[in-house]
Image: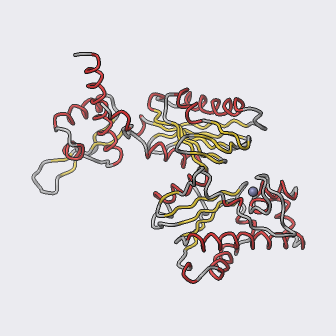
Amino acid sequence: MSTSKHASHTLLKSINQQKVLHLIYSDSPISRVELAQKTGLSQQTVTNIVNRLLEDEVILEGEPQSLESGSGRKRVPLLLNGSRFSAIGIELSGTYARGAAYNLRKERLAEAEMRADSYETEEDMLRVIRGVIGALIKEIPEPDGIKGISFSVHGLVDSSEGILLRSPGMGWKRIPLGRILEEEYGLPVYLENDTNLLALNENISGRLVSSRNNVTLKLGRGIGGAIFVDKTLVTGSGSVAGELGHYKAFLPPHLHECYCGGKGCLTTLASAHGLKRTLGLTVDQFRSALLAEELQAVELREAVKTAIVSALSNIVTMLNPDHIALTGTMLPVFGDSFLDELKERVLANVPQTCRNLEFVHLRTTEDDTVLAIERVLQNLFKIPLDSLSL
Ligand SMILES: [Zn+2]
């Protein structure tokens, strides 16, 4: 066999194997017969592939099940050996990188965290990231089974190109993190903004499954927003759509300059970082002042609540979503009844035609590292399109 023919044969074999593995992962439990039907491969080819995968303990056979026809024949379901494969999820912020490795049953195999006061250069950030990845790889029992590294980024990201646009802790600096790490580790690398990641997971398999058009607003250390129109994340032309933190929401006397160069942005007073930067106030100080019913603090809280109501009312009027999802550590600061009040005020503000709207409080959310690995799982055993040009 010539070298190129041999290469094509090997590639075809590996594509067929990927097809079978992908189906065993996505449609499990699945039998050999069903695999042949769904892949279009011959029964013999499927049997050969399955035997090889069983021998390598990549897949397992489940308990035989009787066929419905009552013919006495049994169907043997095939399952992926979940403990053989793993994925790394990393939460990347301006002051730390925190990672965890999980097997396919989402059991945590390892954890690692590195802190940095600040990043002077791109290399500083990469050093922290490499430190976390290196520590995790050391702990994973079978490092050959790692299927990808995925990031939840507190910053702006071009996820299709794997580029950090507004890098956490480094401002507007384009860093092709995906490419750098893919070359270094030989693994697929996925990057997504933290709020987008949360909204993606809620839309795919969480509390927004039934929704087609929705807006997620996260009020925490910073402010994040994610907009879904017709079940698709709106990215905009520069991958920065949905940045609701910079929605112009304040007027004097609460009009303050924002780090983005604009004025009156929602984040200047409605996020923990904004409160600190704009007024030198920590969330704990703000909370204590509210408990003591200090007039200035109470007035500030009312102004911030009105700003959030106004921003959401305009967004609802513009996009006509069916759901608004709210989350974040700042929400409780505005009081227990804030969500009910917000709903009532927004609904009173918007045109009657936009009032078919549900509010969802994402009170608890999965850990960022778990949300991140979903991207690896969604792409598991997918066949790269460029490998099909035989
Ligand atoms: Zn701004």
With respect to residue 162, does 324 lie above or below?
A: below
Residue visible at 49% across and 43% down in the picture: 107
Identify the residue at the far left of this view. Answer: 71
Relative placement, left or right, of 52 versus 278 is left
With respect to residue 171, does 218 lie above or below?
A: below
Query: Which quadrant holds residue 299?
Result: bottom right
Q: Quadrant of the C terminus?
A: top left
Q: Name the residue nearer the viewer: 24 or 190.
A: 190
Q: Name the residue nearer the viewer: 69 or 201.
A: 201
Question: Residue 252 at what x, y percent from top left?
Answer: 85, 69
Ligand 1 in which quarter: bottom right
Q: Quadrant of the N terminus?
A: top left
Residue visible at 85% across and 57% down in the picture: 278
Relative placement, left or right, of 276 versus 200 is right
Identify the residue at the far front of this view. Answer: 237
Question: Residue 40 at what x, y percent from top left?
Answer: 20, 43
Relative placement, left or right, of 178 versus 117 is left
Whether residue 291 is visible here, answered yes or no, is: no
Residue visible at 79% across and 63% down in the picture: 264
Identify the residue at the far top of this view. Answer: 2
Query: Which quadrant holds residue 267?
Result: bottom right
Q: Name the residue nearer the viewer: 273 or 54.
A: 273
Whether residue 373 is visible here, answered yes or no, is: yes
Relative placement, left or right, of 260 versus 110 is right
With respect to residue 231, does 11 lie above or below?
A: above
What scheme was used to colour the molecule? Answer: secondary structure
